[in-house]
Amino acid sequence: MYVFRLAKLDDLDEIIAMVQERMNWFLERNILQWKLYLVHHPVGEWKKAIEDKQLYVEIFQDKIIGCVQFQYYDPNYWDDSYQLYIKKLCTKVGFKKVGHYLIEQAVLLAKKKNISKIRLDCLSTNKKLNQIYEDYGFHLVKSGIYDKYYYPFNLREMDLK
């Protein structure tokens, strides 16, 4: 049985282990998606997301198989409008369709809160990931370089209305 719930501080070690496993998976395939992910998003940032009740986990058979952070503002990349922003989306290696389910949860939450757009950023050079987001209905809004980390990004948005 699958359970989607807010993450708890007790989940932090398992979440970070899942992120590290995904980072290694990317590196083994020469995908630079998250080469320095935990440097740019250290454990303290994940802990704060849990404390702020923004980080959710997907559980299967008492194991975390995915996580996602939902925020309502993202001034680093976007304007100051109130929308639903997807951050820290990660799935456990070896599980299929978890990312799709997490995006479905974002859609449900946005509709419940009468939010008209779901937004995210992703590495612009990962063509497969960009195609996945395009297939989900996230159209390209803007491309750029985030100067803080020299991160070439795409801003993507899904319109719900």
Image (spheres, rainbow, N blue to C red):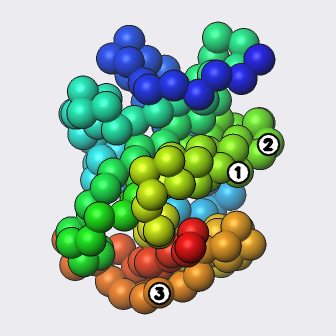
Q: Nearer the viewer, residue 41 or 108?
A: 108
Query: Which residue lies under the disc numbered 1?
Result: 100
State the image coordinates of residue 99 (x, y, percent, origin top left): 66, 48
- Give the mark, 3 or 2, whose residue is nearer the N terminus: 2
Q: Which mark is residue 96?
A: 2
State the image coordinates of residue 94 (x, y, percent, origin top left): 77, 36
Disc 3 to disc 2, C-alpha distance: 27 Å
123 to 93, vertically: above or below: below
Please tell me in which quadrant of the rendered image residue 148 appears.
bottom left
Q: Amino acid at mark 3?
A: Val
Q: Which mark is residue 141?
A: 3
> Are discs 3 and 2 less than 8 Å apart at CB?
no
Disc 1 to disc 3, C-alpha distance: 21 Å
Secondary structure found at label 2: loop
Q: Which mark is residue 151?
A: none
Residue at 44% across, 26% down:
6
Dot 2 alpha-carbon crowd within 10 angstroms: few under 14, some 14 to 19, many 20 or more: few
Q: Amino acid at mark 1?
A: His
Residue at 70% across, 67% down:
136
Q: Is residue 133 visible?
A: yes
State the image coordinates of residue 69 (x, y, percent, origin top left): 41, 44
Q: Nearer the viewer, mark 3 or mark 2?
A: 3
Looking at the image, residue 62 sits to the left or right of residue 161; the answer is right
134 to 113, vertically: above or below: below
Q: Nearer the viewer, residue 139 or 36?
A: 139
Looking at the image, residue 51 sits to the left or right of residue 144; the answer is left
Q: Nearer the viewer, residue 101 or 62?
A: 101
Residue at 29% across, 36% down:
49
- Give the mark, 1 or 3, whose residue is nearer the N terminus: 1
Secondary structure found at label 3: strand
